[in-house]
Image (tube, rainbow, N blue to C red):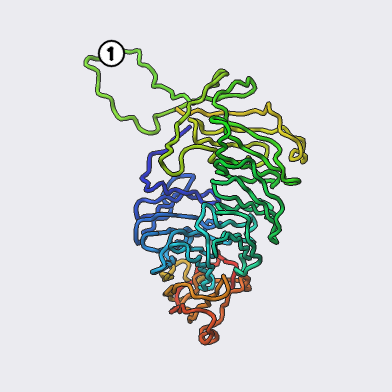
Amino acid sequence: MNFSEAFKLSSLLCRFSPDGKYLASCVQYRLVVRDVSTLQIRQLYTCLDQIQHIEWSADSLFILCAMYRRGLVQVWSLEQPEWHCKIDEGSAGLVASCWSPDGRHILNTTEFHLRITVWSLCTKSVSYIKYPKACQQGVTFTRDGRYMALAERRDCKDYVSIFVCSDWQLLRHFDTDTQDLAGIEWAPNGCVLAVWDTCLEYKILLYSLDGRLLSAYCAYEWSLGIKSVAWSPSSQFLAVGSYDGKLCFFLQVRLLNHVTWKMITEFGHPAAINNPKIVVYKEAEKGPPLGLGRLSFPPPLPLAAPLSASESKYEIASVPVSLQTLKPATDRANPRMGVGMLAFSADSYFLATRNGQYALVSICCAPRSRGRNHGKEKASEGAVRGLRLPGAEMQCPVAEAPQESSSSLRRQQASVSAAVPWPLHTPSSLRKNRSQAQWHAPLIPAAGKAETGLSSKPASAIAGEAETGGDEFNASNGEALSNSVRPCLGM
């Protein structure tokens, strides 16, 4: 393996762009974007405070920087560095921020999970979704980006709401048979939604898009339950990792098929590997070559070796092999035990798992299958496994474009601000707020017809509407993005 020089990094904030061309990293309040092929700095941005979260848009054209302590979100454009957007949630605070699948909406979760604010970069409109549940994974999108499932908590009961991402309208709303919902996850085909309960109870529920309960599965009772869930890319398998306290050193990964939703096999993490069909890879560090020349006295002081000088290799260990176990700290929250990571291969033939209780990084399982019917056959116990042992306010001023591109841009001057009120008591869980503004500049220009359903009326047409809420936008003309950045909406 070849290693580059070490770069400064803060809080492990380093993300590759979805197209794989850029690498974004954070150093305190600075955002550095590098070209992956050369590692040269492509753009350098300065935020208002220390960055705590970054996320790329799906098309790799924008990057989001969240500063939770100040309740701020700043959005930067990679193609036009002069363009930027600032969102301030005000007194409501901020605990989470993410992109919608289309890369033109930002979802901000306020403190105490009072609501989720949906900010549109196309129309400058704002929508509110009330009662989001504070859980491990409470928001999930289908792979095609058409639907969003949201876990809610109201009246001491768990609910799931399904929204259409094009206009953020409520499609389905149903309650779930859970005591304390811990997470939700769409199948890759978008037809089934997996819902699992708290770790104190083993229960996983499968719902259809219209809210019908397809199946419920419980492996055991009166013990710690589900810790991780993963769908196979083909949507034929659902892997469930659990604590499984029935055996001290034997934790289970259970596979469910998509036909009957019954368990088809179990894969365990034994403390000792005795099966000769299992291949065990052990990581060993390569030592520096021994010098056979003349020795000097006294010996020279050791110098600090660079990061690139360390090398490692993998050796095949002879079976049987005993795994090093780690005793979990029972007096602390989230002890290191159970199957905490699951990942399928792209062809759904291999499953990688990670057990936190052992000094074990991954186990790869290859169930024997025959074509498309492999979901109906039980995986063989002699599967090949490989083990690795370790050694609110929104402001979007836009600067003038460069001289060479000024002829292709419309001259506008922008400044947008919106004060975010606290949630108003309305019978609907989703409220829309249309911007009351005369555009100085659209946040993102548009080329086609509006598809989101959010209002793009002029200020004079919507100034008197009472249902839109209390937010007001003050804007002035500014500069739009170039034609190479085309959103889904139009002006």
Q: Quadrant of residue 129 in the image?
A: bottom right
Residue under the point 25% across and 15% down: 296
Type of residue at label 1?
A: Leu
Question: Which one is nearer the viewer's eye here, 435 or 247?
Answer: 247
Against 395, is 283 above or below? above
Q: How many marks?
A: 1
Residue under the point 54% across and 61% down: 156
Q: The C terminus appears in which quarter of the rendering?
A: bottom right
Q: Position of residue 259 (x, y in %)?
A: 76, 46
Report whether residue 491 is seen. no
Against 378, is 73 above or below? below
Question: Which one is nearer the viewer's eye here, 380 or 317?
Answer: 380
**314 on left or right of 258:** left
Residue under the point 55% across and 49% down: 198
Q: Quadrant of residue 220 in the image?
A: top right
Q: Position of residue 14 (x, y in %)?
A: 44, 48
Q: Position of residue 274 (x, y in %)?
A: 60, 20
Report whether residue 107 is seen. yes
Residue lying furthest left in this view? 298
Q: Secondary structure at mark 1?
A: loop
Residue behind mark 1: 295
**232 on left or right of 222:** right
Q: Quadrant of residue 101 in the image?
A: bottom right
- How would you rate the neighbour count of disc 1 (Cα within 10 Å): few for under 14, some for 14-19, many for 20 or more? few
Question: Which one is nearer the viewer's eye here, 253 or 8?
Answer: 253
Residue lying furthest front in this view? 222
Against 193, is 394 above or below? below
